Amino acid sequence: MHSWYSIFPKSPWLSIYAWVVFCILPFFYILRSASPMGLLIGFTLLVFFFLSYYFSVKSDSGLMYMWISFEIVITVLMTLLFGYVYLSIFIAFFIGNIRNPVGFFIVYGLHIAILIGAVVAGFFIEIELFLSQIHFIILAIIGVVLLPFNLYNRQRRDRLQDQLILARQRISELTIVQERERIARDLHDTLGQKLSMIGLKSDLAVRLMERDIESAKAELQDIRQISSTALKEVRVLVSGMRRVKLKDELVRVEQLLRVAEIEIELEGDPNFPDMSPIVENVLVMCLKEAINNVVKHSYAKHCCIAFQRTEKEFRIIVKDNGIGIAQNGVNLPGNGLEGMEERLEFVNGNLSISSQEGTQLKITVPAVLKQIKEG
């Protein structure tokens, strides 16, 4: 159950002195017996008591209760035969270290009831002996009543502290994992668009190299500019200082769609003046991922982006005339769509997907979040 040193109070000097006193006192009471048989019985009971106490410390829960029962019986015999009730302090120490609440209260109640019964019976058997130490007996009974609760609560508090430490360590680990996932999503959303654009422009530059060298040079220059922009965005992203508006992101979205030779149609105004920065950053990332999916997977020729503001919500709708999600064999959300859903969940938003005559992504965020501030 416990190591042998864990069944005593944390104050080491008090533990040593208490142990020595309570180990020596029984011999004083036993030696008062004049008969050799009384001496033999007394020493035998002490040996059995300390053996039982040792085995109770080393045993599992089932055998532990058996050894405690032996200790209680020996304590009753020592009380009735020699007037020594103080072995009950040893049992009280041990009961306080029982972790099972049911076992603790059962053994605790039985121990007190049996001890009081033995003391009352002792007064009838040898009243003068018990009256001479009535003050110490009362103190011993008070100790037997209070000591287990004190130790039980202390052990419980220590266990809760250990669990709290483990919980804090687990939270720290989960925070690190969550931050890594966030960085991975942000890098995916930030670099994915730029790398897609670089790939498309590289293919275009290769095709133009033989018939229009000037246009090819212009495309290569655009590639360099896009790569520089991506590098800056990554640096800002890592520093945690990145803040992008929808109207600024829309410029890059239009450029990406034009490079992919996808006709773009805009509806509504991307400027939402009462939108909080947190919500706008989430919508920017979602818009990036939606356009990336259109460019990579839809094989569309037309894409419509609608910005809508109602009394209760902000709404962005991205619809293309491509082959659709189900026809593309993508029956389950990929990493990009899962990242969009996770971000929207953070601001109580919602993502709905339909695939009829193309694919439509509907991104909504409650307008009541306009009161949220950064940080």
Image: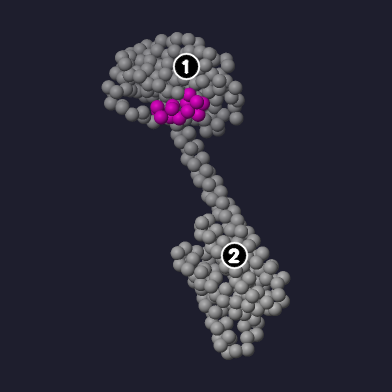
Give me the residue at 47% from left, 40% from top: 177
In this view of the protein, which residue sits in the foreground, 66 or 258? 66
**In this picture, is 94 found above or below 247?**
below
Range of magenta residues = 336-349
Vertical comparison of 53 with 312: above or below: below
Query: Residue 97, relative to residue 322: is it above or below?
Result: below
Secondary structure at numbered mark 1: strand
Colour mapping used in the image: one colour
Amino acid marked by disc 1:
Arg
Residue 347 sits inside the magenta stretch: yes
Cα–Cα span, label 2 and label 1 = 70 Å
Question: What numbered label is drawn on residue 315?
Answer: 1
Does the segment drawn in magenta span residue 101?
no
* Residue 82 placement (x, y as % from top left): 62, 80
Mark 2 or mark 1: whose residue is earlier in sequence: 2
- Quadrant of the image for the C terminus? top right
For the question of whether residue 359 can be seen, the reply is: yes
Reading the image, the residue beneath label 2 is: 112
Percent across and percent down for residue 191 are: 44, 28
Disc 1 packing (10 Å; few <14; some 14–19; many ≥20) = many
Name the foreground residue: 225 vs 42. Answer: 42
Work out whether residue 56 or residue 33 is closer to the camera in this orientation and state it: 33
